[in-house]
Image (cartoon, helix red, strand yellow):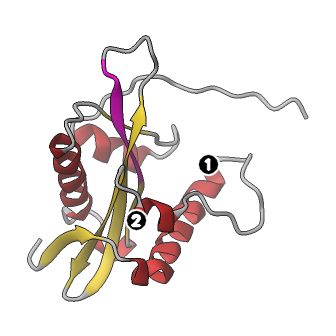
Amino acid sequence: MKNLIIRPAQKEEIDILITFEQGIVETERPMDSTLKDDEIHYYDLTYLIETPIAEVVVAEIDGQLVGSGYALIKEAKPYQKHTHYAYLGFMYVKPEYRGKGVNKAILESLKQWAINKNIREIRLEVYQENIGAKKAYEKAGFKGNLLEMRMSLE
C-alpha cells in the first residue's frame, strides 16, 4: 500500500494503542464466553514498548495510525527443539484498511525483528471462529499447531 510505514510504537501513542486493543476485544468478545463483561485489557502496552525482549510496531498511513502488532520473545518448553520463540499479539488493523496489505507488512516487520534477535520460530493464537484472521495467517505461512479445548462446568 502506498505511503505505508511500519515503525516502532511510541509511549506517547498509548491512547491510540489502547483504542486498538479495545477493537480487538470487541471483535473477540462474541467468540469467547469466558471474557468479563466490563472493560478488559489483554496487554501491558507500556511494558511491551519499553522491554528489550519485545517489539511493538504500528502501521502509519499519511500520519495516521491504522494498525499494530507486537512480538515478544518467550522461552520454549524444555522438550521443544527451539529454546525461544517470538509470540505475536496485538494484531490489529482498522476495518477500513483491512485487505490492503497492512497486516502483511506488520507481520513482515515482526518476522524480521525476530530474525535479527536470532529467533527462528514465531507463534500466535487465533480464535477457532475467527475465520478471516485464520485465513490471513495461513496465507502468511502459519499452520495450525494445537487446538486448545475448554468446557464450562457451570
Q: Residue furthest right?
A: 154
Image coordinates of residue 47 in percent, x first then y, are 49, 62
- SS label for mark 1: helix
Q: Residue drawn at (11%, 80%), measured in percent from left and top?
A: 3
Q: Residue furthest top?
A: 79
Q: Residue furthest left?
A: 2
- Residue 83 is covered by the magenta coloring: yes
Give above or below for 56 relative to 31. below
Residue holding disc 2: 49
Identify the disc placed on residue 31: 1
Amino acid residing under circle 1 = Met
Q: Residue drawn at (52%, 42%), measured in percent from left and top?
A: 127
Q: Residue drawn at (64%, 56%), measured in percent from left and top?
A: 29
Mark 2–mark 1 Cα distance, whole angstroms, equals 28 Å
For mark 2, does the 10 Å Cα neighbourhood hold few (<14), some (14 to 19), or many (20 or more) residues? Answer: some
Give the foreground label among 2 and 1: 2
Amino acid residing under circle 2 = Ile
Image coordinates of residue 39 in percent, x first then y, are 71, 69
Image coordinates of residue 60 in percent, x first then y, are 24, 78
Give above or below for 142 relative to 8. above
Q: Earlier in the sequence, mark 2 or mark 1?
A: 1
- Residue 58 is covered by the magenta coloring: no
Give 3 or 18, whichever is nearer the viewer. Answer: 18
Give 30 or 52, whichever is nearer the viewer. Answer: 52
